[in-house]
Image (cartoon, grey):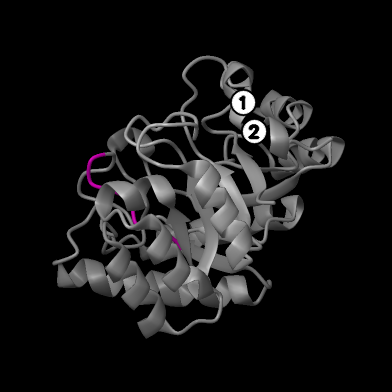
Amino acid sequence: MPAFAANLSMLFAEHDFLDRFDAAADAGFSAVEFLFPYDHPPEAIAERLRRNRLTLALFNLPPGDLTAGERGLAALPNRFDEFRSGVVRALDYAEAAGARRLHMMAGIASPADDKASVSFVRALDYATSELASKGLDLLIEPINARNMPGYFLDDFGRAERTIANHGAHNLKLQFDIYHRQIMHGDVTVAFRRLLPIIGHVQIASVPSRNEPDGEELNYPFLFAELDRLGYAGFVGCEYTPRGTTRDGLDWFKSFARR
């Protein structure tokens, strides 16, 4: 049975952020993920996880200035010092909260820009080395241009080549089924082929990015396929509920922690 992680940046938004941990546990989740925890002390995150017997599946490295439109620093030339400080900060949170995987956002930059490509590889070199010293995996995620125009890593093939060429044992693919369907389709065959490098999976309906209970994708089939293939990682529920989160969890009832 897939191990589902509630994405607390999107689910249970009717609660304050720290109270979302309680709400997720009460709804039957055994794990959570989120985008950015940095508005709260690492000790506060860790306490909510312990209180609710939750595992932290994943969170992101600091993204830069979100309000200015930044979506990661890795591919931004001349921002390496800030990127490096962000890795150090994220590792403090990972240690306190017991996270084993961190996602490195690439940033808004053209993949045809040689300086951006050099910056991205430099960031990968640094982050994979620092995380490996702590026994952690670094994840990269292709993101579709409809949701994030101009994102550097906007293609699954490029992500696959990056992982193969880099060669770090702890560099993994974050396989977001929603983004995959929008960019390339062929979700099941791609998952079967890429399974050896996949470190995390995320889900949402397509095209609306709501609960995984309809529209283009047959999620019951995909969940069964994850089990059949022996996928042992987490499945992050990174979707926008149509109403309150609890009202939209019928799809999850058979998976909930008892």
Q: Nearer the viewer, residue 29 or 89?
A: 29
Q: Nearer the viewer, residue 62 or 226?
A: 226
- Can the viewer see residue 89 in this picture? no
Crowd band around label 2 with a 10 angstrom C-alpha radius: few (<14), some (14–19), many (20+): some
Q: Position of residue 117 (x, y in %)?
A: 24, 71
Q: Position of residue 232 (x, y in %)?
A: 66, 63
* Amino acid at circle 1: Leu
Q: Main secondary structure of the magenta part?
A: loop
**What's the magenta region?**
140-146
Residue 221 belongs to magenta span: no
Q: Secondary structure at mark 2?
A: helix
* Amino acid at circle 2: Phe
Residue drawn at x 23%, y 40% as measured from the top left:
146
Q: Which residue carries the number 1 mark? A: 249
* Vertical relation: 12 (above or below) 81: above
Which label is found at residue 252? 2
Q: Is 214 positioned to the left or the right of 70 in the image?
A: right
Identify the image quadrant of the C terminus: top right
